[in-house]
Image (spheres, coloured by chain):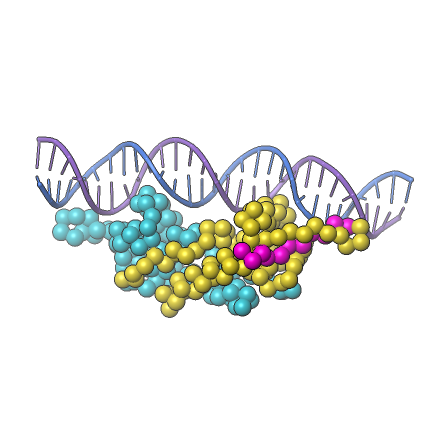
Chain colours: A cyan, B yellow, C purple, D blue
Amino acid sequence: MAVNNPIAGLNKIFDNRIRLGVMSIVSVNEEINFNDLKQLLEVTDGNLATHLQTLEESGFLKVHKGFVGRKTNTTYAITKAGEKAFKDHIQALENMIRGVK
Amino acid sequence: MAVNNPIAGLNKIFDNRIRLGVMSIVSVNEEINFNDLKQLLEVTDGNLATHLQTLEESGFLKVHKGFVGRKTNTTYAITKAGEKAFKDHIQALENMIRGVK
DNA sequence: AAAAGCACTTTGCATCACAAAGTAATAACG
DNA sequence: CGTTATTACTTTGTGATGCAAAGTGCTTTT
């Protein structure tokens, strides 16, 4: 029988698939805007916006409200804390998967 | 920018950490009983029981109610469908992680 | 000037996760 | 033998979550 809790290191924030997806995107992109995220993840805007808010409130995402010409253009980027938390989460996932293999 | 949806192949049933943990345990153990699961995952019994039920109803887990002496002893094992679904989910996770690395 | 698009926020509802309490059986203790 | 504990759940209640849809304020297009 396995000996330790396989899910011990998992971050609750990343239980949600959309938040997970956002993190995996922002961790490989310098910055990304709302619409690109929405299209990549194939989610409704309201839904995406709330998850982005959760991630921002958790300190994992920084938001930059800028302009492209006159139009608002909000970009999202990962924070140091976000990088750490996501890296740890992936590590925990990998450990879990290793137990399976 | 990344090109496809990193979370497309993820199974909704496995969004939940406890169900994920159960699957990772039953996929490496021939069978496991309620109490061992409970201790491994460090969850309350009511909580565990409902997730086991969800997994059973999804066809990913088979339940065997037997006895050890006179005492009931319920064991849980993965089904073929469960193996497939979990394998696919892990594959999707690995793809996502690969995108990150 | 009207209609459409963008980037959200707000609202409302349905589903969920979870702890706690309840139950029914056996088992251990004195 | 009676009481208390333990096991393996189920039921219940509640707060949190996920999500779509509608609303808002701005810009852009026609």
Residue at the spot 32% in from the left edge and 59% down from the top edge: B4
Closer to us: A67 or B56: B56
- Residue B17 relative to residue C21: left or right: left
Camera sees residue B24: yes
- Residue C25 relative to residue B27: left or right: right
- Residue A81 relative to residue C28: left or right: left
Where residue A21 sits, quadrant-wise, is bottom left
Tell whether position A1 is magenta.
no
Residue A8's spot in the image, x, y percent? 54, 59
Q: Quadrant of the C terminus of chain A?
A: bottom right
Q: Main secondary structure of the magenta part?
A: strand
Tell whether position B75 is magenta.
yes
Residue at the spot 70% in from the left edge and 50% down from the top edge: B65
Closer to us: A29 or B99: B99
Camera sees residue B39: no
- Residue C17 relative to residue B7: left or right: right
Count of labels in the image: 0
Up-down: is B67 above or below D12?
Answer: below
Residue B52's spot in the image, x, y percent? 59, 49
Task: Read off the magenta span.
Answer: B71-81
Residue B10's spot in the image, x, y percent? 43, 55
Residue at the spot 32% in from the left edge and 43% down from the top edge: A46
